[in-house]
Image (cartoon, helix red, strand yellow):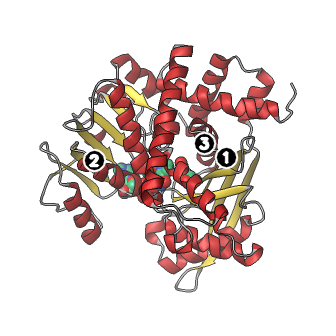
Amino acid sequence: MNALAATNRNFRHAARILGLDSKLERSLLIPFREIKVECTIPKDDGSLVSYVGFRVQHDNARGPMKGGIRYHPEVDPDEVNALAQLMTWKTAVVNIPYGGAKGGIGCSPGDLSKSELERLTRVFTQKIHDLIGIHADVPAPDMGTNAQTMAWILDEYSKFHGHSPAVVTGKPIDLGGSLGRDAATGRGVVFATEALLADYGKSIEGLTFAVQGFGNVGSWAARLIHERGGKVIAVSDITGAVRNPNGIDIPELLKHKEETRSLANFNGADQMDPNELLIHECDVLIPCALGGVLNRENAADVKAKFIIEAANHPTDPEADEILSKKGVIVLPDIYANAGGVTVSYFEWVQNIQGFMWDEDKVNSELQTYMTRAFHKIKSMCHSHNCNLRMGAFTLGVDRVARATLLRGWEA
Ligand SMILES: NC(=O)C1=CN([C@@H]2O[C@H](COP(=O)(O)OP(=O)(O)OC[C@H]3O[C@@H](n4cnc5c(N)ncnc54)[C@H](O)[C@@H]3O)[C@@H](O)[C@H]2O)C=CC1
Ligand SMILES: O=C(O)CCC(=O)C(=O)O
């Protein structure tokens, strides 16, 4: 099922549970604004190449729209729409004063030189600068983008609007980025995992983990799990996959990845088929890469007891049903990976205050937000007799619906 159909289906299910008015339901589903722009740049050899850039601003009832920008060949308008909508529910789940947005450019960032990426980012920013802004829409990194990408957006935007560090988050510390933002999504995943496991009388120490994706989110999640005594027994990324039933030495794997840019030829683990990772024997599976990876083709073969959705939309609704029948507990993306946008919020607050927090404060506030949201989700699950995904969706949708009604929406 495509990402937008899946996200709409989850939203409609939550709206039914909440008994939302059908006109309000329809209004919440329609994006506030969809932007599609042509981005033509000269390549390093002087030839011209054109890309399509998207920004979907889904909802701003609770505050400025917020969400990452993705550079990936499979970026398409439906997917960006789905991811923007997920941001609206996600910011509401962790109760930060934002709406939702998402952007992307259909490109292969690994095939572009640094100067080509810079030109592409600047052209994209020139095309959308009037529609983003500190109190309108605040981009951040997502797959294929990073702090450097945010620095270029900040610089280009500031040419039009004056120096504006709060227009993006996830920027370099030297330009007003927050301590702890780089690790925040992975750290939030770990806080979310701890909250869930505690609910089952368990802890990370001694459990086995399989992690798909070893970029920003996956590598930080794996590192922090390793530090807490969890055994990361399988890791994959676009270059391949490795496994070690005794636990992979994650700091060594990080060093190897840094030196070789690949998981291949790592001495501390055996190579494995990357397609096997999601169905590998483990206690906890953490998808940290693409959407739709758990679907009706593989869900029945999943062996993990818990799935923590660090990626956005990794589980298709058809897989959700299969996993639920198998008794697998799924912690949904709009909560599990909300640590990134939560620390983005702290970064924005620091920029507006002109006051920098120390890293311990960032991390401890993040833990407070993640733990509080988990208990709120659980209480929605009890009230509505639903699973964690619907607990999170009902929590997020209810908060956005209330804000919309209070602002004067009338059926
Ligand atoms: N960066 C952030 O703050 C946040 C990211 N996310 C989500 O987390 C996921 C990962 O994002 P980042 O770590 O930021 O991206 P990234 O670009 O830093 O890393 C992506 C990783 O996925 C791997 N990958 C790509 N295709 C794969 C495949 N077919 N099989 C296995 N691995 C594959 C890449 O090799 C890389 O290791 C995405 O779904 C993103 O939307 C969610 C919330 C915040
Ligand atoms: O930090 C942010 O503003 C957005 C992060 C993001 O794109 C996400 O949570 O999917």
Q: 154 above or below 307?
A: below
Q: Does dot 2 land on a helix, a strand or a loop? A: helix
- Dot 3 alpha-carbon crowd within 10 angstroms: few under 14, some 14 to 19, many 20 or more: many
- Of 230 and 114, nearer the camera is 230
- Dot 2 alpha-carbon crowd within 10 angstroms: few under 14, some 14 to 19, many 20 or more: some
Q: 198 above or below 288?
A: above
Give me the residue at 51% from left, 19% from top.
Answer: 381
Q: Does dot 1 land on a helix, a strand or a loop? A: loop
- For disc 1, the marked residue is 98
Residue 272: x and y, percent? Answer: 20, 48
Within the image, what quadrant is residue 398 found in? top right
Which one is earlier in the sequence, the residue at label 3 or at label 1? 3
The residues tagged by marks 2 and 3 sit, at their Cα atoms, a distance apart of 32 Å
The residues tagged by marks 3 and 1 sit, at their Cα atoms, a distance apart of 6 Å
Residue 326 horizontal side relative to residue 112, left or right = left
- Of 237 and 179, nearer the camera is 179
- Of 363 and 44, nearer the camera is 363
Residue 176: x and y, percent? Answer: 56, 69
Going by the numbered disc 3, the residue's amino acid type is: Thr
Which one is earlier in the sequence, the residue at label 2 or at label 3? 3
Say if disc 1 is inside 8 Å of ligand 2. yes
> What's the mark number on residue 91?
3
